[in-house]
Amino acid sequence: MINKKVKNVEEALQGVQSNMTFMLGGFGLCGIPENTITELVKRDVRDVTCISNNAGVDDFGLGLLLQNKQIKKMISSYVGENDEFERQMLSGELEVELTPQGTLAEKCRAAQAGFPAFYTPAGYGTEVAEGKETREFDGKMYVLETAFKADFAFVKAWKGDAAGNLVFKGTARNFNPNMCGAAKITIAEVEELVPVGTLDPNDVHIPGIFVQRIFQAENYEKRIEQRTVRK
Amino acid sequence: MINKKVKNVEEALQGVQSNMTFMLGGFGLCGIPENTITELVKRDVRDVTCISNNAGVDDFGLGLLLQNKQIKKMISSYVGENDEFERQMLSGELEVELTPQGTLAEKCRAAQAGFPAFYTPAGYGTEVAEGKETREFDGKMYVLETAFKADFAFVKAWKGDAAGNLVFKGTARNFNPNMCGAAKITIAEVEELVPVGTLDPNDVHIPGIFVQRIFQAENYEKRIEQRTVRK
Amino acid sequence: MALNKNGIAQRIAQEVQDGSYVNLGIGIPTMVANYVRTDIEVEFQSENGVLGMGPFPFEGEEDADIINAGKQTITTLPGASFFDSSLSFAMIRGKHVDLTILGAMEVAENGDIANWKIPGKMVKGMGGAMDLVASAENIIVAMMHTNKLGEPKLLKQCSLPLTGVGCVKKVVTNLAVLEVKNNQFHLLERAPGVSVEEIQKVTAGTLIVNGEIPEMILS
Amino acid sequence: MALNKNGIAQRIAQEVQDGSYVNLGIGIPTMVANYVRTDIEVEFQSENGVLGMGPFPFEGEEDADIINAGKQTITTLPGASFFDSSLSFAMIRGKHVDLTILGAMEVAENGDIANWKIPGKMVKGMGGAMDLVASAENIIVAMMHTNKLGEPKLLKQCSLPLTGVGCVKKVVTNLAVLEVKNNQFHLLERAPGVSVEEIQKVTAGTLIVNGEIPEMILS
């Protein structure tokens, strides 16, 4: 068993630098690597490009990095719910590349799986396809999209072990598994680091080979964006 | 919950006809849809194309369909261990298309996921790439491969429920999940059909949306090709 | 009388067929789930990674790890499953989801849809909408017939940046049910008490009125 | 004296680095696992969908659902995982597997490898070999230096249909350890008691002999 366990978030984030490209798991505030984001805010890491489906809210998630003006460019599918984001985007401080959500997921998976490019129907005939190769297969038009290239992938799992195996919970899974192994180095923070051998090999969502470092996270706020209940 | 449960293999195989293209899960004899194959042998279904990583052995698995001369063409990555296969292939009775194993898996997944084509490095510079488009990305050469098209996918799972959710065991998983939803109709045979609600939603390997029919299989021989033990 | 948003959702619910997988967009589409007949089997998919969504949780039972694409806390029904984003869009792109219901800013008579961007305004992004409209076999748009200024949203050609081309099959508005085919809007039903003339007046795209147009029946 | 197959496996085991993921082909490569140092951390991947393979099971403990790519019954170690074929080749194609060890019929001085097809004979197929050699960062070939007729297998150019182009980094045979670079075979080590001349005689590709060539050390 190859040991991926590191002591804490400080040790996990060794080598993280300004001007790098990061992938961050999560959908809205669900399943985001909270501990990693908190540590990135502490560090003087600037002008980074973040690949993340969303951009957090003003005072939580990636919003914290935005407030701190650490982000140069966001690659996302949906960036509402964030005033500071809007201000920086409209003022031109922040570069934004909007990508269809399924394409975003697959650009991660392509990087993980060694595919340089793939054809998808999403965005054909729209400004998303501008400047991209398009092509017909069986009478339908597709857009050629390329794999992401990133330095670090930061993901959050429910459980994990020192071998780097990960298990996710509910919809906190989302982009996290697709980002594992999609960057040069993948760092996983987990709610519960369990002893090696306790995860059922059939139920591992992401085998440890895709993860370089794993650490037991400290605590999770798990903020809910839209608390909706029935009467 | 949309009910996919059918009574037995006879009901499951409704609509299966000669000249169709089938996908069959399994690696060697591990995780093959035994009940489905037995039923296909009983039926007068001829001149079928089978997409399957292997072709079984002489008297088990797809070898049974070969003995019965029901197969017109095999699309596989490895077809050793089968004398009747060899005889039919060398005599020209059987058409064989050999595909790198990773490409075979991805051609299934592409069909499942709505990708018409993808670029892979496997087979570049070899006869597998002959007649196919090749292309350079970042200084490396790739071959354009297209998604499979099939009428039926026959898969075997360990557990499943009436919603069509599937869970696989060990390396009997192999191609089975990648074939689910990769054909017009996917039929799953399971060792154990469990009550809906008993599978943990986090541990479902294939959500029911990819499966059209599911049935409780009768018994499994689960023959071992290379019984290897330590002393 | 024109329908309110609940009325639109109620009418669209009639389009949901037994045994179908349905993806509901944010806004009116989300409300459709409340009106689907209870004697048919339907499963709701949300692109953030859940199939088999149930109703909102009871107070105190919210789980931050279980949300829908609108980031609302949800519950799941027996037979539900969770999965990653790549597999979620495999369901969508691979045409395994049978029906997509979403909102729109504009729909053109050729089935084009615009629903993600207003130039000069803050752009929030397309989310999963472009993937959904590019692949779904059956797309129903739920929207008001006109915008806040009273201007038509059913057009000869979209003026806003497109989300997808030639993909919308049906539109249900506060005034009408329309089928989109052969580069025309075909009027199928009127909202109760709304005349064909009223609908024609606020429809900029080609409107085909064939014979007597029945009123919607909302049980 | 030329090595036997176990000797080749033993020598290759020295190439396996601490902390690496390794894919072993059928034949001699499978035997490498028996000789890897026990004080280093290595995980074995098999393309049929398992990471963290252990030794063969004890008699009576075989499980038909747990096999390796050679269809042999295996066991798994703590920390193991099972996965589908698509994810398995994501590991391989995505360069997550660090070292691939496989057999060959021919290797050319430019790193080309042929190991899947002999024209006119029954063709069994390439299995995962083409995916492995097209993507692995580090590929070591384990083979006999000559074929059954005594003819060289280290060639200027492969005569058999290729499995992959320019991909082999190192070859370990019963006679020698050779590095493949700059379109040449560089002799690194000799089997105990085997002379440079003997190796030269059965090597058809360009053989570079730089200085004194040490004998392999097989502990």
Image (spheres, coloured by chain):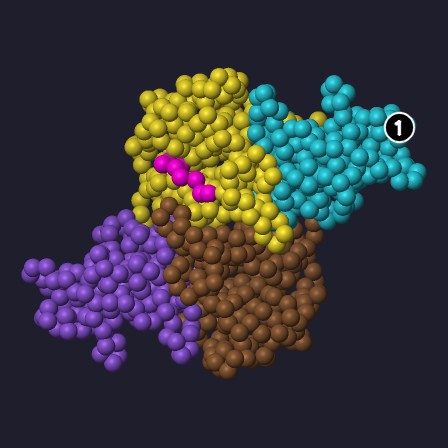
Chain colours: A yellow, B brown, C cyan, D purple
Determine the residue located farthest toward the right in the rendered image: C212
Subunit under mark 1: C
Say whether residue A149 is magenta: yes
Residue B49 in the image, given as x and y percentages of width and height:
58, 69
Q: Which residues are magenta?
A: A146-153
Relative side of A118 to D196, left or right:
right
Q: Amino acid at mark 1?
A: Glu
Rendered image quadrant of residue A45: top left
Residue B38 in the image, given as x and y percentages of width and height:
61, 73
Total marks drawn?
A: 1
Looking at the magenta stretch, what is its main secondary structure?
loop
* Residue under pointer 1: C197
Closer-to-camera residue (B171/C22): C22
Q: What residue appears at the point 47 percent right and 60 percent down from the top-left corner?
A: B132
Residue D32 in the image, given as x and y percentages of width and height:
27, 63
Q: What residue appears at the point 54 percent right and 65 percent down from the top-left corner?
A: B51
Q: What residue appears at the point 54 percent right and 63 percent down from the top-left corner?
A: B25
Q: What residue appears at the point 52 percent right and 67 percent down from the top-left corner?
A: B75
Say few, some or many: other residues with alpha carbon within 10 Å of mark 1 (under 14 / 14 to 19 / 20 or more).
few
**As displayed, is residue A118 above or below residue B87?**
above
Rendered image quadrant of residue C149: top right
Say whether residue D26 is magenta: no
Q: Do we see residue A72 in this rendering?
A: yes
Which secondary structure, mark 1? helix
